[in-house]
Amino acid sequence: MNPETQPRISADDTQTSHGPAAMLLRAIWTVCSATGIIVLIFLSLGRIHLSHGGTQIVGAFVYSVTIAVPSMIVLNWAAPRFGEKLQRFSVVIYAMVLISTAMAGTFAAGLVLQLVGIIPQSEYWAEIHASLPFAIIITLMIGLTTTTYETMRFRLQATTLELRTRQVEQERAYKLLAEAQLSSLESRIHPHFLFNTLNSIAALIPSDPVRAEDTVGKLASLLRFSLNAHQSGLVPLSQELKIVRDYLEIEKTRFGARIRYEIAVPAALDDVKVPPLAVQSLVENAVKHVVSKRPEGAAIRITGGNDSGRIHLEVADDGPGFSLDAITPEHGLGNLIARLELLFGQAGQLAVTRENEKTVVRISFPA
């Protein structure tokens, strides 16, 4: 995966569940749960009677609101400040917070129930005395359970974020390593090409200095292309084919009529991105192993096409052919195979076939 195209990862990913809307939903869920638990407990103890069931349910709801909401607010404030620093004592701290808010909420609930007329003023302290133990137990039960769940969920989110971040960093490291390997492979190609070209120029200077000067210009163009291609990684096919023409013209200064070539690549492929010096490597291989080995030289034909989203480029010659099994990593084609693998993985391929008494070397990769 190209790491620059990956989604940005930040701490905000772990905080989406701590916004105001999420807090409100949790508060509603906690209040409703607490109300239901209180009603169930009181029903099991026989403290809720059908004749006063509605009033007592309202009372349970008031207790839930006055205790649960402050508990959540105080815990959300205390957890990030003391939870990590005093992790060993976090349960004790949370329990103290919950007991404090349970007590304060019980007194507040008694006042609310007194103001709305559910309990008379004379029974206020009796109500507090009867309700406080239940309020503390229920608050600790719900509060510690919820806090434990939230803590574990937050840690899971933080761990997931860390793993995703490390994965992105690892992919970036792999990309940098691949680029370094690619640069190393390309650097092996340049000296071979340069030495061959300089030999051609040296052979021309005594007999045809004008042509030697023109060849020097082509060499300068090739070197500029090589440097720019090294920085970009992929180049338009039109530029690659121009370099191939310049290369073949340079080699014609050495071999003359022994090199016969034709480039028949559709113009529709001009903008296709290809590995730099890929086609040139195939042509150089034909020149080195066929043209230079035979008195009659060779005819070289370069073609290309787009087949269902895959680009294929072919260099055919009328030489005797060869097998890829004999190619070593240091060979020009060995370098090209390694570059295709680094750039395209298993989707980049190089193959050698015999067709109509010609040797066809084909590279193919995704468009």
Image: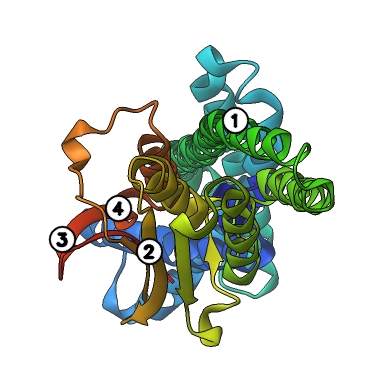
Check whether the beta carbons of the residues at disc 4 and disc 2 lie within 8 A of each other.
Answer: no
Q: CA distance from mark 4 to mark 1?
A: 20 Å
Residue depicted at 57% across the width and 56% down the height: 248
Q: CA distance from mark 4 to mark 3?
A: 14 Å
Q: CA distance from mark 2 to mark 3?
A: 15 Å
Mark 4 and mark 1 lie on one chain; the one further toward the N terminus is 1
Residue type, mark 4 in image: Leu
Check whether the beta carbons of the residues at disc 4 and disc 3 lie within 8 A of each other.
Answer: no
Residue type, mark 2 in image: Ala
Dot 1: what SS? helix
Image height check: is 31 above or below 50? above
Residue depicted at 40% across the width and 53% down the height: 344
Residue type, mark 1 in image: Ser
Mark 2 and mark 1 lie on one chain; the one further toward the N terminus is 1
Q: Which residue is mark 3?
A: 354
Q: Which residue is mark 4?
A: 350
In the rendered image, which quarter is residue 203 located in?
top right
Tell me: 215 left or right of 36.
Answer: right
Q: Which residue is mark 1?
A: 187
Q: State which quarter of the image contains the C terminus.
A: bottom left
Q: Which residue is mark 2?
A: 299
Q: Residue 110: percent from the left, percent from the top? A: 62, 57
Q: Residue 153: percent from the left, percent from the top? A: 44, 43
Q: CA distance from mark 4 to mark 2?
A: 21 Å
Residue type, mark 3 in image: Arg
Q: Which mark's residue is nearer the viewer, 2 or 3? A: 2
Q: Residue 273: percent from the left, percent from the top? A: 56, 66
Labelled disc at residue 133: none
Q: Which mark's residue is nearer the viewer, 4 or 3? A: 3
